[in-house]
Image: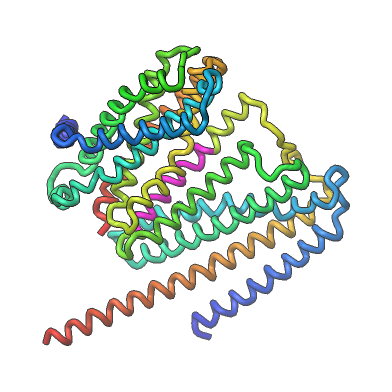
């Protein structure tokens, strides 16, 4: 229970700081909107086509937005020597990581909540499948991006070209999750995938989340203490 | 003979032996095996593509095990840790080389028999992802500063090792549901006896060649590490002298 207390403390701190500046949410939101607009201009989709491609576009927009925000996620901690403090503190290091990842997850979920209506308007969307499944797919997919993204952001913290490195590491690792998200979302939007297949994708996404959350928690301390 | 001299002799003998085996394999594959009825001479690329693809799935495991050893020894025994890090780096480089050859020969073969260079078939996709993962591993090593790159790279190697089976399985599940597009499939279900010698000579030859470049690159990396240590040591000594 003490561990959860540490996680919540970190989460509260991140949420409060973000609430005061709202930098990363605003940045992500505007970036994601821009991607949506660019894609709709580039493809000029009709209703049927947009249903086919909007799953992919949604996730690409979110992925890029997440990467841009995550590049900044640890800068504040580094400037204020939080990482050094964490190394000396008796609290487990992974609590810092989990708090940060949950905070990032909440930010991206806010962006998704704003983006969804825009999507419906811009792409003339009309969901043919079980729309409630999206309530399962979106958080699972977001967590897959955010948990690895937060981890690789801290991994690249003390490297040269950090902004370049994060997507280079995050994209290959996330490809299986990305495949799952896009297939499941498109399946729900078009209703062309039978429920069993969508279930397989969702289970796979959940498995991916579980495995990588465990790996991140186990290895975070190693990365934090890499001299 | 001193130890390095023995190593050098063994390395030379190994290199020559692998060359001999590769030459025999070349002769078997190009001249002795009967021409494939369906594919013609293009089918002979089989003897290069398949052994190299099989080997390129083997080297990532060396990288993974060496990275785990690095993480284990990092605090306990720094010298052993350095050795395993050198091995991890070399294994990753050899993986990239073999996976590249596999992808290139595969596309050439695909162009010859299917008429297309690339298709998003499960097998091809998972191989491409493996390649991407290990290229990003090498990128990370290049970008990170000297003190941390080993630890960061070892951590990334664990991620890659977890990712590879997921990619493989996810795409397998996908395949069972969708019929694969255009994939004739290699002759997995047993080789014709006439093809066996060429295949075996080639897989042994490429394995020997891979082990040779692994060892060569490992020795090079060890040398670099030792030179670095010596430079650090002499820098420390110099700083002590000026302090007095």
Left or right side of B148 for B29: right
- For the N terminus of chain A, give its image quadrant: top left
Q: Which residues are magenta?
A: B150-167
In the depicted structure, whether residue B112 falls above or below residue A143: below
Q: Image quadrant for the C terminus of chain A?
A: bottom left
Note whether residue B72 is visible.
no
Residue B3, visible in the rendered structure: yes
Q: Residue at x 19, y 82 (%)?
A: B239
Q: Is residue A123 above or below residue B36?
A: above
- A73 and B34: which is toward the camera: A73
Res B75 quadrant in image: bottom left
Determine whether, in the image, residue A114 is placed left or right of residue A14. right
For image coordinates 40% across by 19% down, the residue present is A121
Which residue is located at x 46 percent, y 46 percent?
A: B161
- On the image, the x and y values in percent for residue B199 come to 75, 54
The quarter of the picture where residue A26 lies is top left
Name the residue nearer the viewer: B49 or A136: A136
> Is A179 one of the magenta-colored residues?
no
* Residue at image point 35% right, 75% down: B228
Across and down, in percent, residue B138 comes to: 45, 57
Could you say where residue B91 lies in the image, as x and y percent from the top left?
A: 50, 59
* Count of numbered badges drawn on the protein: 0
Does the magenta stretch mainly form a helix, a strand or a loop? helix
* Above or below A159: residue A42: above
Q: Is residue B157 magenta?
A: yes
| Percent coordinates x, y for residue B238 in the rendering | 22, 84
Q: How is the image coloured?
A: rainbow
């Amino acid at each position: 229970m003490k561990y959860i207390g540490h996680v919540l403390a970190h989460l509260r701190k991140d949420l409060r700081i973000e609430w005061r500046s709202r930098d990363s949410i605003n940045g992500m939101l505007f970036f994601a909107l821009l991607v949506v607009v660019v894609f709709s201009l580039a493809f000029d989709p009709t209703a049927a086509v947009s249903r086919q491609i909007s799953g992919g576009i949604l996730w690409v927009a979110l992925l890029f937005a997440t990467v841009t925000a995550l590049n900044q996620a640890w800068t504040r901690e580094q400037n204020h020597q939080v990482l050094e403090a964490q190394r000396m503190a008796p609290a487990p290091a992974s609590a810092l990581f989990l708090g940060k990842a949950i905070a990032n997850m909440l930010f991206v979920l806010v962006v998704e909540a704003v983006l969804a209506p825009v999507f419906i308007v811009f792409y003339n969307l009309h969901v043919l499948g079980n729309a409630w499944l999206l309530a399962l797919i979106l958080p699972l997919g977001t967590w897959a991006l955010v948990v690895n993204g937060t981890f690789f952001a801290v991994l690249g913290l003390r490297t040269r070209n950090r902004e370049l490195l994060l997507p280079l590491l995050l994209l290959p690792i996330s490809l299986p999750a990305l495949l799952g998200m896009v297939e499941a979302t498109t399946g729900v939007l078009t209703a062309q995938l039978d429920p069993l297949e969508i279930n397989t994708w969702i289970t796979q996404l959940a498995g991916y989340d579980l495995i990588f959350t465990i790996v991140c928690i186990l290895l975070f301390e190693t990365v934090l203490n890499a001299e | 003979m001193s130890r390095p001299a023995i190593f050098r002799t063994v390395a030379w003998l190994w290199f020559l032996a692998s060359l001999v085996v590769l030459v025999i394999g070349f002769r078997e594959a190009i001249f002795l095996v009967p021409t494939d009825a369906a594919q013609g001479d293009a089918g002979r690329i089989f003897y290069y593509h398949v052994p190299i693809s099989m080997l390129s799935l083997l080297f990532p495991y060396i990288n993974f095990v060496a990275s785990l050893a690095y993480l284990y020894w990092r605090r306990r025994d720094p010298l052993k840790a350095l050795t395993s890090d050198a091995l991890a780096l070399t294994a990753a480089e050899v993986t990239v080389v073999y996976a590249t050859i596999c992808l290139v020969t595969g596309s050439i073969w695909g162009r010859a028999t299917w008429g297309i260079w690339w298709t998003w078939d499960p097998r091809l996709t998972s191989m491409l992802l493996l390649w991407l993962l290990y290229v990003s591993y090498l990128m990370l090593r290049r970008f990170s500063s000297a003190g941390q790159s080993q630890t960061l790279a070892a951590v990334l190697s664990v991620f890659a090792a977890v990712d590879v089976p997921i990619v493989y399985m996810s795409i397998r599940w996908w395949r069972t549901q969708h019929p694969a597009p255009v994939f004739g499939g290699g002759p997995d279900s047993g080789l014709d006896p006439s093809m066996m010698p060429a295949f075996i000579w080639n897989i042994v030859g490429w394995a020997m060649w891979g082990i040779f470049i692994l060892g060569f690159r490992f020795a090079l990396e060890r040398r670099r590490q030792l030179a670095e240590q010596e430079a650090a040591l002499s820098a420390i000594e110099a700083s002590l002298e000026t302090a007095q």
